[in-house]
């Protein structure tokens, strides 16, 4: 009897030990992907708006939710590292991410922020992908830096050709913001492409460039020079704050050119709300600008994105939400596909191996030699009747 009780007790102890032992990580959580989110999450830009960063953060959150639902064995942990608009705070955010040993990060809305993150994270072999940092030098010869958007070289050259061939200006004015890596490159590249085309033209179109710095408050002198030179089209590859101030001051002087701009203007919805709906001047406002996506796209990924986004938020997604979603989706896909999602080398190799991935802003995504995708440039017209898709530039 004693031997039987001892055997029963031993079996019971063994069973309890087995029940109380922790389950293997794969059974508890599946594959865990740790990703840093480094953006101006708590700040306004130029003291006016933060819709852009909010839209980007919502796009990334939507990507996480949809990716986890389609990959039940994957759990994505987004680690937030907010910073302000000063570059010192970007450095501090990057330092916190490095201390936490996060292997990959999404961030760098502005090119100057992306440069800081690239230089801080790259030497530590931490993969960095910027949704919207478009200066070509961010990723050129940088093995751990990637981008989800097109390069500024493509944007400025495409806008110059579109302005000449489609808009047929009589004279062009350029607001060249020289104090930002993003706007300065766009301005210089536009001038270069425009000049090359005009040098071969039998009837060259004059262009008048006005150099300004960020947060210029009074554009009066530039507006008067444009009026004197009979400028019909004003090119502003700048931030939204520049556009708002210039367009309203120009309208007050009775100057209503056709505007040409870039993704730095924010979303189409923001421009319509702040300029087209202006009670005094909006009816005369017309602009053409590039965007990250075709809002009418009906591919499977575009539909899934819109459905999941609208189920999580109280408004429709913008192009900024879409390109941030794509940056996150590309990174999640690479990390999920590698056996070692905790090392930068493995994540980098997986990113370079992506071919033909369907995204919201691209139906067949892959990275080129400079870690920059080859994508279409989508052109919209904005006027009193709303936002209108014009064409894709390839």
Image: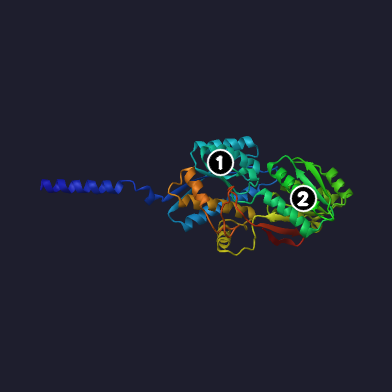
Q: Which of marks 2 and 1 is in front?
A: 2
Q: Quick check: marks 2 and 1 in contact, CB under 8 Å?
A: no
Identified at 45% across, 52% down, the residue is 74
Closer to the camera in the image, 217 or 232: 232
Query: Residue under circle 2?
Result: 196
Image location of residue 44, percent across then percent down: 66, 43
Furthest toward the left, the residue is 1
Point out residue 156 in the picture as x, y percentages from the top left corner.
Answer: 71, 50
**Residue 323 location in percent, x, y?**
61, 53
Q: Residue at x 48, y 49 (%)?
A: 335
Which image quadrant for residue 316? bottom right
Rendered image: mark on residue 81: 1
Question: The C terminus appears in which quarter of the rendering?
Answer: bottom right
How many numbered markers are drawn? Answer: 2
Give the structural element (helix, strand or loop) at label 1. loop
Q: Dot 1, crowdedness within 10 Å: few (<14), some or many (≥20)?
A: many
Residue 234, x across and y down, in percent: 80, 51
Which residue is depicted at the point 76% across and 44% down? 176
The secondary element bearing badge 2 is classed as helix
């Amino acid at each position: 009897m004693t031997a039987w009780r001892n055997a029963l007790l031993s079996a019971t102890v063994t069973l309890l030990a087995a029940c109380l032992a922790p389950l293997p990580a794969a059974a508890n959580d599946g594959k865990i992907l740790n990703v840093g989110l480094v953006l101006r999450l708590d700040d306004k830009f130029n003291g006016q708006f933060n819709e852009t960063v909010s839209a980007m953060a919502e796009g990334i959150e939507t990507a996480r939710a949809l990716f986890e639902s389609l990959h039940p064995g994957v759990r994505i942990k987004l680690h937030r590292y907010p910073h302000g608009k000063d570059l010192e705070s970007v450095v501090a955010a990057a330092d916190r991410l490095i201390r936490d040993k996060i292997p990959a990060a999404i961030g760098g809305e502005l090119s100057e922020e992306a440069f800081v993150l690239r230089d801080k994270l790259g030497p530590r072999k931490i993969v960095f992908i910027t949704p919207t940092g478009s200066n070509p030098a961010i990723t050129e010869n940088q093995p751990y830096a990637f981008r989800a958007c097109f390069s500024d070289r493509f944007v400025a050259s495409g806008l110059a050709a579109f302005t000449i061939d489609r808009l047929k200006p009589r004279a062009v004015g350029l607001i060249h913001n020289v104090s930002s890596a993003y706007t300065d490159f766009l301005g210089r590249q536009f001038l270069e492409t425009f000049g090359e085309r005009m040098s071969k033209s039998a009837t060259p179109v004059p262009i008048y460039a006005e150099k300004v710095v960020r947060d210029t408050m009074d554009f009066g002198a530039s507006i008067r020079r444009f009026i004197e030179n009979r400028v019909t089209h004003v090119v502003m590859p700048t931030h939204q704050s520049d556009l708002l101030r210039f367009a309203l001051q120009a309208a007050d002087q009775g100057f209503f050119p056709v505007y040409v701009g870039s993704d730095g203007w924010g979303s189409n919805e923001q421009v319509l709300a702040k300029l087209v709906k202006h009670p005094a001047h909006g009816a005369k406002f017309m602009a053409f600008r590039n965007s990250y996506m075709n809002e009418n796209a009906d591919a499977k990924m575009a539909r899934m994105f819109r459905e999941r986004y609208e189920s999580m938020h109280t408004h429709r997604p913008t192009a900024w939400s879409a390109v941030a979603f794509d940056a996150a989706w590309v990174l999640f896909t690479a990390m999920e596909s590698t056996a070692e999602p905790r090392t930068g080398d493995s994540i980098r190799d997986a990113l370079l191996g992506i071919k033909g991935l369907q995204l919201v802003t691209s139906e067949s995504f892959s990275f080129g030699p400079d870690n920059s995708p080859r994508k279409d440039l989508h052109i919209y017209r904005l006027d009193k009747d709303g936002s209108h898709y014009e064409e894709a530039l390839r």
